[in-house]
Amino acid sequence: MRISEISRQTSETQIAIKLDLDGTGRHEISTGIGFLDHMLTHLAVHGLFDLSMQAKGDLHIDTHHTVEDVALALGQAFDAALADRRGIVRMGDCFAPMDETLAHVAVDLSGRPYAVVQAEWHAPYVGNIPTTLFPHFFESFAVTARCNLHARVLYGRDDHHQAEALFKAWARALDSATQLDPRRAGAIPSTKGML
């Protein structure tokens, strides 16, 4: 059972997550930030992860703490559900088109956190999320998920489409990387013998 439950409580946010890596895309997501809920719904639906998330944050200040802490808690949930990462495919990537936009995300569940995010945004906000927070979201996720994550928008005109294509590509890349490879017979996918 590759399932995790994470609770993250700080003076800025309170977050509860339930994650099943081998789900069907069922989701119940409430962060108080409509556009973030929309993006995380793509994670569940396109990654086929069952995801329940409730987050309450200091939105009277701004969205930064909630977006950041949701990413950190979500990374923790993936890390916990993957356990020692035995038998997984480990690496995955996806190109995702969204109308005029094309995005690509590659992930390696290597145990080593690193993120590179390349995107040019055309406006300061999408919904009520500053576009500067999208790279920070993926960077924060990579740290606690202990994964290498490269995300880029190859081209696009509409920031909503760019964000949506990134999250869809991320979902599909994670789905590929978290799959169990029967040929590994439960072995750790690393020449070092551990991740």
Image: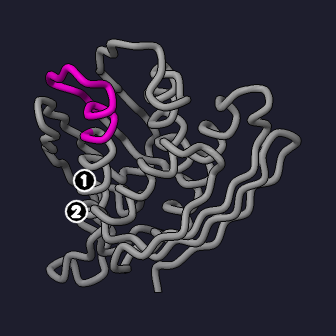
The disc at residue 173 is 1
On the image, the x and y values in percent for residue 21 come to 40, 73
| Position of residue 40 in the picture relative to residue 67 (left or right) | left
Query: Vertically, is 131 above or below 177?
Result: above
Quadrant in the picture for residue 59: top right
| Position of residue 17 in the picture relative to residue 79 (left or right) | right
On the image, the x and y values in percent for residue 90 come to 28, 59
The disc at residue 176 is 2
Query: Vertically, is 76 above or below 18?
Result: above
The three-letter amino acid code for the residue at tag 2 is: Ser
C-alpha gap between disc 1 and disc 2: 5 Å
The three-letter amino acid code for the residue at tag 1 is: Ala
The span shown in magenta is 151-165
Task: Report whether residue 191 is seen.
Answer: no
At 31% from the left and 55% from the top, the residue drawn is 171
Q: Which residue lies furthest to the right in this view?
A: 11
